[in-house]
Amino acid sequence: MPQKLTVFGFTDVHSQQAMLDYPTQVRRSAYLAVEDALAAFGPADLSICGGDNLSDYPYWERSCGLPKRNFLDIKEKYIRCFAPSAKGERVLYVAGNNDMYLGDAPVGEEPYSSTEFYLTGPMNKTLGILPEGEAYFVRCDKKPAELPYLDAFHYVVDGVDFIGINIDPNTAFNSHEGYYTNETVDWVARKLDEVDPDGYKPVFLVGHLSALFYYGGTELKETMINGNASRFYRALEGHHNLFYLYGHMHGEDCMYRDSSSAVLHIVKQKDGSFLPYDNNQGQTDSSRLPEYAFSLVHMGGLRPFSLENFEEDAVWGFGGGEEYKLFPKTATPKFAQYLAMEIEQDKVTFYIRNVGSLEGFALGKDVPLPYTVYFQKKPQ
Ligand SMILES: [Fe+2]
């Protein structure tokens, strides 16, 4: 690997409702994040888009009705938004549950897959076509056989391993937020053992679904609620320098004032369960920690929930409904965060960055302290 690999993580933009009317629009916080990232770090070696690009058309879940024409239009706009953030336009996309609510059911006569960011590009061009053995495809039961769904994959980017994991397309509509199937988790487990047989190589696993999480920094919850969280954690166990980069949670429940709060170091308990060492708040590096099993890293999020945390530039439209109206939550967020990281030989440094105007979380003014994790070393 080069001396330093820079990676950006953008997630949960949630272009929604009238923004998904044709012609579509990407929420402004995504452009602001790219602009800030380029100004602060220069172009990354890789950018990550953590999913939930789309939502609420016309309902917040299970509407499954975004026409293909609209999807292709906003897909193109997301590509153009994120491409300049990384050298060679290398952007790794995973799908969020809301992307699937809107597109992964039979949509009219033209079904499509939210993993088209690989299937029809740009990932297949910028990061390369995945050889057999590096990709795990599944079928969506309700869609034509010729429309595969990329459920897990592995890329090596400048010598660093990145594994992607996607939500099951067949059950996304029947559950609140979908889950990773046993088969997909097992594929990831085998891939991890293959790329990191000794358990100490830095590996980055990227998926949309959140995991163990401290609401507001204090209340610990398991947020991988539908699925097999324990199977997932067992797959990561034994890979000490594995970082699971995820989104899904966003907004007021996770307003990070320092970058360390977005990182949790998971310790296996005597009863076999997995829990964070603590909430990791206010730390600048990992040197106080005992050995731990793996780490969870939240990439922030580019959309809040509360109406007061949006600017006044909301969009009018139909948003898939009957009525022409204003959709206040299409506005630019006053609170929005993304993640940057710098991977070096012996460590990785995480930077949570603000791109809103909210006091305490303002772009260019409130810069959370970075957090450095020194890679764990194999005992001699
Ligand atoms: Fe989500």
Image (cartoon, helix red, strand yellow):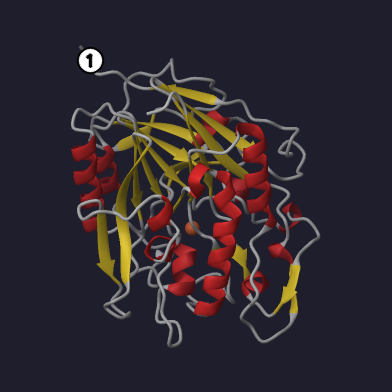
Report the amino acid beneath label 1: Pro
Eyeballing the image, is 29 above or below 322?
above
Picture coordinates of residue 59, whole percent (x, y): 57, 74
Expressed as whole percent of the image width and height from the top left, the position of residue 131 reads 24, 54
Neighbourhood count class around disc 1 (C-alpha, 10 Å): few under 14, some 14–19, many 20 upward: few
> Does residue 282 appear left or right of residue 191 in this picture?
right
Residue 47 shows in the view: no
Decide if residue 269 is in sight here. Answer: yes
Above or below residue 163? Residue 142 is below
Which residue is rendered at x = 62% and y = 46% of the image?
Answer: 34
The image quarter containing residue 364 is: top right
**Mark 1 Cβ and ligand 1 under 8 Å apart:** no
Horizontal and vertical percent position of residue 155: 33, 45
Could you say where residue 10 lies in the image, as x and y percent from the top left? 55, 48
- Position of the C terminus by quadrant: top left
Q: Which residue is mark 1?
A: 379
In this rendering, position of residue 211 left or right of residue 305: left
Q: Left or right: 230 with respect to 79?
A: left
